[in-house]
Image (cartoon, rainbow, N blue to C red):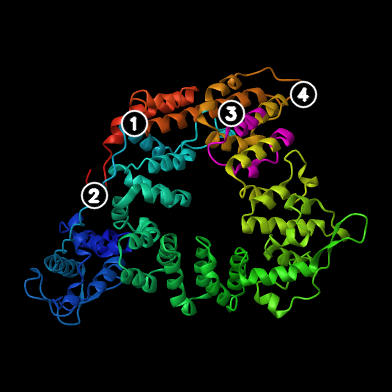
Amino acid sequence: MPDPARTAPSASTPDTNDTDADTDAGVCGVGVGVESRAAVFAPPAAERGLPTGGVPWEELVTAALLGTDRRPLRSGPSAPGTSGHPASAPGASAGPAALLDAAALHTVRRRAALVPAVGAAPPVPAPTDPRPPLPPAARRRLAQLLADRSAPPAGGRRGSAPDLTELIPQWLALAGERGYRAPAEQLPALLDAARARTDLRPHVLSFAGPRGLWLAALNPDWRFALRASTGAHRTATGSPGEIRRLWEEGLFAERVALLGAVRAQDPAAARELLAGTWSAERAEDRLMFLDSLRAGLGAADEPFLEEALSDRSRNVRSTAAELLSALPGSALARRMASRATTCVNPDRTGDALTIAVEAPHECDADMQRDGVTPVPPSGRGERSWWLGQLVEAAPLSVWPERFGGRSAQEIVALPVADGWEAELHAAWCRAAVRQRDPAWARALLGAPSIPPANGPGTASLAERSQLLATLPTAERADWVAGFIAAHGLSEAFQLLGVCALPWAGPLGRAVVDALDIARDAGSYPWSFSGVMGLAERCLDPAEANRLEVLTAIQDEPEGASPGAGGYWSEAFRRLVSTLRLRAAMAAELTPDGTTDDAAPEHGTEASPEGRAAASSATSDRDQGAAAPGAPGTAT
């Protein structure tokens, strides 16, 4: 008879939970097979009060693994009906036959004691969504966008086909503007995409609607959707008591979402919610909640923010001071104006008016309470650091009065004595951004043709982009177009990021002309890959036909980078095909737009890769329409 140790499961068995079942099959040889694996989930017979013949199951397993020669089985009295073998005397050593008999008895008892699992209740039906369904062409386009998992091309080259994943936000925004509901079969893919990309979450949750939230509740991986939407949902449908209960008992993410939703509808109610639990909140939570008051900030928030100036947390105090300084009529703004005007004054002692600066000599307790940080960053002097904070927090309206009624442009043009110009202008830039003052932003930006290093304000492109964001949309685009025409694209990426979409005609033409000039210079297109990517997403799709001429491969000028012409042709083909694809997306989402058959090819006809993408979308038409939905979803 074979040694039981040879038929026992290998020590390398990966799943230790299956040890008992595998031993049943290997030791007993009584047809345990796959069925015995179900018995693993039942407790051993001894744990259920069943007779076991006096031998624990664990001892049987040990004897089977080591062999009865090395580990004799010490059995108790045999239970009746176990086998035809003679019963061993108590305490006698049992051989292989007794071991197998005992294991078989254990196995039968374990199977017989299995209790059927209780069936889970089916989920409640999915709620209805009254919004109209997507047009068929847009439905297929969404399936194509969500299914794109293409790997980046070898060597870092993107090819000439559009990058579909970069167009998902625009598609979702367009679908949301037109009020369509998400197809039920695409809800899982939409939630997966939002889980992977936080930038998609607001659009996805709005587009998915109540059915998306219903589905998210069935999958722990999509729990983010419930946290992000609970506040808005309760605000829209809940009573004041339910809103307060969620505020007091909800998770942190739910409370943040709730406070933001209430603030958007009723700023005073949101402030009252926050004030009711303010003293009991943690410092990091107070900071996050306080930041939500930026939306709808008004004079009514001043008393609460004044109290926050005495908070234990330095970050909370600084944020409260920043919010108060954005209210030019606040008491803090007046205090800061008084301090700033003692440091910055007109000087008429010379032939021409200049600006005299006397930075503060100390940072007293009152200044620190009003949000002035006493310790400067590494490399900054204390006095200049304190001066910048005072001027930044002072209302810009005090300076025309201080300088004899001069305009912002005239004040910025005045010479500043003793080398304080850079510090003073940088503080005015931050004040213009904080107070959203377009007149001061315009004065500090200066003419777009002036080199940044010689401009009236800051030379930092990041700060210039913040100043631009305070200007009206059309003026912003015109300024950036003039900057690109004068200085090219090398420093324009951050500035382009604050321009409204789609880019206005002059701005779009300036970008394309600059790209054409860069191509003629013989450089490679990936030096401008960031701007090219922005152009694909931001240029007006109507520019596609005008750009077609740029897709041809031109003769390379002398001294050009090898192969640059072909790379530029590829980049412009991708630009044109992306613009046409965006036009097709918009047409497909328009009720009276293009027909179903014409729409897929319309956006991808500029390149072989684009035509292949359209062909793939057409061939997947039935698959996208019949994709399996989530359990319980209604179509």
Q: Residues within 10 Å of mark 3 (few under 14, many from 20)?
A: many
Q: Amino acid at mark 3?
A: Ala
Cα separation between marks 2 and 1: 23 Å
Taking 616 as reference, is 224 above or below it?
below
Sequence order check: which comes first, mark 1 or mark 3? 1
Disc 2 is placed on an element classified as: loop
As for residue 488 lying within the magenta part, the answer is: yes
Image quarter of residue 339: bottom right
Residue depicted at 49% across the width and 35% down the height: 163
Q: Which disc, if any, is residue 599? A: none
Q: Which disc, if any, is residue 128? A: 2
- Report the residue marked by disc 3: 571
Cα separation between marks 4 and 3: 21 Å
Q: Is residue 603 left or right of residue 215?
A: right
Residue depicted at 49% across the width and 80% down the height: 279
Point out residue 253 in the picture as x, y percentages from the top left corner.
43, 64
In the image, 118 versus 69, the foreground residue is: 118
Please give the range of residues in magenta: 484-513
In the image, which is nearer the foreground, mark 2 or mark 4? 2
- Report the residue marked by disc 4: 559
In the image, which is nearer the foreground, mark 1 or mark 3? 1
